[in-house]
Image: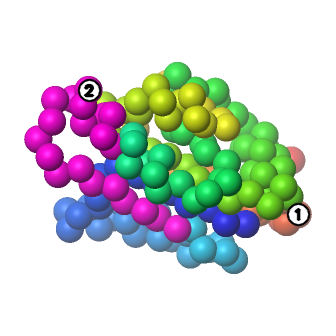
Amino acid sequence: MRVSVIAAGRFGTGHREERRLFERYAGRLPFPLDLREIEVRKRLPPDKLTSEESTRLLDAVPAGAAVVALDERGRTLATRDLAARLAAWRDDGRAIAFLVGGADGLDPSVRERADLVLSLGAATWPHLLVRALIAEQVYRAHCILTGHPYHRD
């Protein structure tokens, strides 16, 4: 499987624990979980910043990849259902790109382009922690797809 997390913003030096958590789950995978960080350094009004971040996120998506946009208005999926989606894209030979917007979310153009708009629930999650949550869910999906025991069975 070829999976990327493409996220607005950077971990930076003050967020070592969040990075370690991402790396913990990414390191358990037998394939690389690529993290690409997009940073817009211009001082822009929130709507223009969101638009610029979203354009850069979409530009970083590998050609032909399935796009999963993380958005509070998205669908919530059980882990098994997410695993099935990932498997279908994998079996079609598609890479998978999870897109994480900045503090003001994603531009509508990203949601329109997405193959799946996914919500991690009604709670608000720090954007740097969302990267670790995605890595954990990709790891858990991989375990399900390779027949490891799943605690919900």
Looking at the rendering, which quadrant does residue 113 occupy? top right
Residue ID for mark 1: 147
Looking at the rendering, which quadrant does residue 141 occupy? bottom right
Q: Is residue 6 left or right of residue 17?
A: right
Seen at 62% across and 62% down, the residue is: 3
**Which three-letter amino acid code belongs to the residue tagged 1?**
Gly
Seen at 60% across and 43% down, the residue is: 68
**Which three-letter amino acid code belongs to the residue tagged 2?**
Asp
- Closer to the camera: disc 2 or disc 1? 2
Say which element carries label 2.
helix
| Image height of 121 relative to 84, above or below | above
Q: Is residue 44 magenta?
A: yes
Tell me if mark 2 has few (under 14), some (14-19) or many (20+) residues whose alpha carbon lies within 10 angstroms of its own: few
Q: Nearer the viewer, residue 66 or 77?
A: 66
Q: Is residue 46 left or right of residue 145?
A: left
| Image height of 63 relative to 45, above or below | below
* N-term-proximal mark, 2 vs 1: 2
Write down the region rendered in magenta.
Answer: 34-53
Q: Is residue 145 magenta?
A: no
Residue 138 seen in render: no
Residue 96: image location, x then y, percent: 65, 55
Residue ID for mark 2: 47
Say which element carries label 1.
loop
Seen at 53% across and 30% down, the residue is: 111
| Image height of 123 relative to 4, above or below | above
